[in-house]
Image (tube, rainbow, N blue to C red):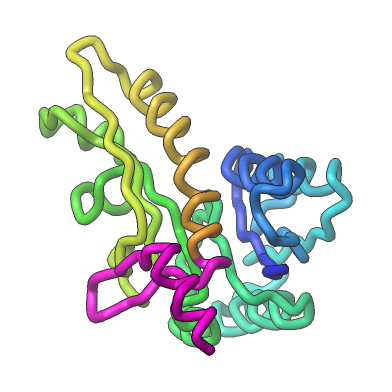
Amino acid sequence: MLKLGVLASGGGSNLQAIIDEIAAKKLDAEIRVVISNKTDAYALTRAKNHGIPTRVITKEAFPVKDAFDAQICRALKESGVELVVLAGYMRLLSPAVIRAFPQRMMNIHPSLLPSFSGLHVQQKALEYGVKFSGATVHFVDEGLDTGPIIIQAVVPVLDSDTVESLSKRILAEEHRIYPEAIRLFIEDRLTVEGRRVFIKDPAVRAIKEAKK
């Protein structure tokens, strides 16, 4: 069973999607801790509703970034976390935290990366006039939304779309593909070569396991 640690700053709807998949026994995983940098993050309430331990680590308590990130890293390691999942975590992590979990930290972003990284993504997509947007799950590296891409989902941009309507349709895809990316990790089907992530065919993997 994979031990997950989730970082969240807001409502935590992606956290809920993961919780639901675990409860439905579609993910062989356990969330060991949910950490937030916001005391009022609804993600913390979601976690508590399911008996998941929570931690709040704020910049007010740890104003020096190195000390803040050291607390994050300590909380994850004390919980025995094997994969870190960023679910709407609105604070950049330091290289030290990322290097502590090499290719064991995922993020989800509401665009088809590398297009429209950063914030206000749907507004950028509408202003640019793209015909398709979507969601991306990627491994976290030391850049801003630059890590190797695991899964993407495409969402058409309609002429009638607003930021709110486009965001809602993209979020539905996020809830679908984030658990799937975690499932692929659990099944040891992800291989990273340079910037590319290759997904192993489950049948091929089963044959290799049988030969061991």
4 horizontally vs 151: left or right? right
Q: In this view, does 49 lie above or below 39?
A: above
Camera-nearest residue between 148 and 208: 208
- As drawn, 206 above or below 150: below
Instruction: Estimate the x, y position of residue 139 in percent, counting from the top left.
Output: 40, 68
Measuring from the top left, give residue 205's x and y in whole percent.
Answer: 45, 72
Q: What span is in magenta?
A: 185-212
Nearer to us in this view, 103 or 59:
103
Determine the image quadrant of residue 82: bottom right
Q: Where is residue 23 in the image (x, y as percent from the top left)?
A: 76, 44
In the rendered image, the quadrant that contains the N terminus is bottom right
Name the residue located 22 percent from the left edge and 37 percent from the top edge.
124
Q: Which of 136 and 66 is in front in this view?
A: 136
Quick one: which residue is furthest to the right in this view? Answer: 51
Number of disc labels: 0
195 part of magenta stretch:
yes
Q: In this view, does 179 lie to the left or right of 190?
A: right
Residue 44 lies left or right of residue 165; in this view the side is right
Q: Within the image, what quadrant is residue 50 found in?
A: top right
Q: Which residue is drawn at 58% across and 68% down?
A: 84
Q: Does residue 21 sit above or below 102 in this rendering?
A: above
Does the magenta run of residues contain 94? no
